[in-house]
Amino acid sequence: MVAGGEPPVASVVAGLPRGAFVVAADSGVDGAHAIGLRVDLAIGDFDSASADAADRVEAAGGRVERYPAAKDATDLELALDAALARKPSGIVVLGGAGGRFDHWLAVAFLLASPLYAGVAIQARWAEATVTVVRSSEVTLSGHPGDILTLLPVHGPARGVRAEGVEWPLHDEDLAPGTTRGVSNVLTRTTARVSAREGVLLAVQPVSPRTE
C-alpha cells in the first residue's frame, strides 16, 4: 500500500515479497512509480496526484477506482478496505502523511482499527516505522540502541510483554494515555512484543536501516 503525502524512500521496500499486489492511494501512484513499483490498483479522487497518474496505471494494466473529493473516508482508508477485500496475510503501508500532524494521527489510529484485526499491518514512513501489535507476538527488527515506544490505542492493552529491550515488560497492563512504554531501547537486533488483549502501536522513530 502506497499512501499519498511525501513519497517513500527506496529503502522502505527492503524485505517486501517480490510480486506483492500494490495498491496506491491518490498521489501514492506517483510515489510508487518513483521507487519502481508497478501499481495494480489505484484508488482516490486524484486531487493531489500528477495529471497523468491514473492514465499511467491503466496503461500498465492496472485498475483505477475514482471517488469524489467530497467523501466520508480518506483515500488511504478506501485503499485499505480494498486491500483487505483481497484477504492478504499482511499489509505494509509506505509513504507519508503529507507533513500534517492530524493526518499522521488519523492514519495511526486507522491502522489499529478493529476492522483490520485479522491482518498484520506495518507502516513505514520517513519519520518512523509503526507496527500494529495485537494478540500475536510480533518480532521487530533494528539495531541495539534504537528507540522503541509502545502506545496502547482504542483502550487498554493487557498482558503486554516486551523482550530484547532495556526495560522488559512482563505481563503488564498499559492504559491509554500512559507514557510507561515511551522511549524503550533495543538491546539486540530484534525485539519481541505481544499483548494478551488490546492493541499497541510499536513505534520505531527511525526506520530500520538496511546496510
Image (cartoon, rainbow, N blue to C red):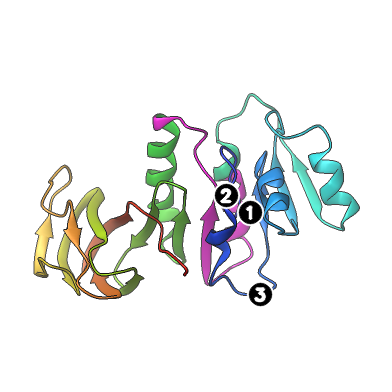
What residue is rendered at 53% in x and 55% in y? 93
Figure check: 76 above or below 80: above
Q: Nearer the viewer, residue 31 or 180?
A: 31
Q: Which residue is mark 2?
A: 8
Query: In the drawing, does residue 134 fall left or right of residue 11?
Result: left
Give how far across and how far down residue 97 sits, in percent: 49, 38
Figure check: 204 above or below 31: below
Instruction: For mark 2, give the secondary structure.
Output: loop
Circle on res. 82? 1
The residue type indicated by label 1 comes to Ala
Res 47 → quadrant: top right
The residue type indicated by label 2 comes to Pro
The residue type indicated by label 3 comes to Arg
Asked if residue 96 is among those painted magenta in the image, a careful observer would answer yes
Tags 1 and 2 touching, CB below 8 Å: no
Q: Nearer the viewer, residue 16 or 199?
A: 16
What residue is rendered at 54% in x and 53% in y? 94
Q: Nearer the viewer, residue 94 or 107?
A: 94
Give how far across and how far down residue 75 sits, in percent: 60, 39
Q: Which residue is mark 3?
A: 18
Lower position in the chain sequence, tag 1 or tag 2? 2
Gap in angstroms between the C-alphas marked 1 and 2: 21 Å
Q: Nearer the viewer, mark 1 or mark 2?
A: 2
Circle on res. 137? none
Lower position in the chain sequence, tag 3 or tag 2? 2
Graded by Cα atoms within 10 Å as few (under 14), some (14 to 19) or many (20 or more), the crowding at tag 1 reads some
